[in-house]
Every structure is written in structure tokens, then in C-alpha cells.
Image: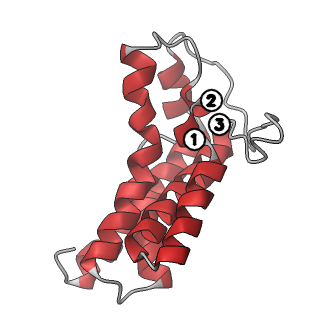
Amino acid sequence: MFVAHLPAAYLAVRAIRPDVTRTVMAAVLAGSVLPDKDLVWFYLVDARQHHHHDYLTHKPMVWALLALVGCVRGSTIAIGVAAGAMLHLMLDSIAGQITWGWPLTDWAVPLVVVPATRDWWVASFLLHWTFAVELMICTAASVVWFLSGKPD
């Protein structure tokens, strides 16, 4: 998933809790892009030696533990961040390999395989039908935001 993490999180919050506070909305939105902070390490330190889905930020158990801590401490912010991150990982599971059973297993398989149809891997993803789904998510989030009449 390239562009729809943030819009998908916005749609999810609006569907589940339309009356949510700005703070919780911000926490979920932040969580929805937080797993990709590993791209800084991926490009600047690791020199692309390992796929960024192999880093801890893409391990569901990490975010499940944050949610548990949030529940124990009564922190809606921690729960919101964890929920956004889990949504990110669910979306990444469509065409990416997320190890949902980690640390017990490293087994992962995408729901959809995007074949390398172009020399540049990004073009293969942008021209695959799954990117149209991303664009639909972005469009839906834009419509919901504009129709809500609120400057969220």
C-alpha cells in the first residue's frame, strides 16, 4: 500500500466512532503511518538489505502490546496509535508480507501477488489493479471529509 493508509484510517474512525475527539483521531492517523517510519532506517542505514516489512515496526505483536498497555493504563491515545498501526499492517497484508504469527513464526504470504511487469518496481505497483483500490479509498475519504463540514 502506497497512499491509502491515512485515508483508510480516517474512514475507519469516521465509521466506527464518528464523534471521536480530535486527539484520538490524531492518534489513530499517526498510528496509521507510524509503521513506515522504518523506511528511514531502510534507506539511510540498512542500505535496502532487508525488506522494511521485516523490521519491528511491521510486527503486529508490537502494536498489540501497545494496545494492551493502553488498555491497562486507560490511555485512549496508545490504543488509538495501536489501532491505526494494526490497520496499516492489515492493508500492507494485501500485497505485502506481514508476519502475523511473529515471534512464533516468520511465515507470511500476501493476499495478492503484484507481478514485476515493469523495470521499476514502483511502476508495477502503480499500474496494478490494487492501486485503483487505494485511489478509491482516497476518494471516499475526501468525500467523507468534505461532506462532514468539520475541519478535522
Can you name the residue that lies furthest to the front here?
73
Q: Name which quarter of the figure residue 67 lies in.
A: bottom right
Residue 142 seen in the figure: no
Q: Do labels 1 and 2 touch, CB within 8 Å?
A: yes
10 Å crowding of disc 1: few (<14), some (14-19), many (20+): many
The kind of residue on which mark 1 rests is His
Q: Amino acid at mark 3?
A: Gly
Give the CA separation, mark 2 to mark 3. 11 Å
Q: Any mark on residue 54, and which? A: 2
State how many labels appear.
3
Q: Residue at x 83, y 38 (%)?
A: 105
Rendering coords of residue 147 (x, y %):
27, 81
Residue matched to label 3: 96
For marks 2 and 3, the one nearer the N-term is 2
Q: How far apart in space, not on screen, are marks 3 and 1 (Cα)?
A: 11 Å
Check if mark 3's residue and mark 1's residue have beta carbons within 8 Å: no
Q: Is residue 76 visible?
A: yes
State the CA–CA distance, disc 1 to disc 2. Answer: 7 Å
Between 9 and 135, the one nearer to me in the picture: 9
Image-based side of 56 in relation to 142, left or right: right
Quarter assignment of residue 17: bottom left
Residue matched to label 1 = 58
Identify the residue shown where x is 36% and y is 15%.
Answer: 44
**Residue 62, percent from left and from top:** 59, 50
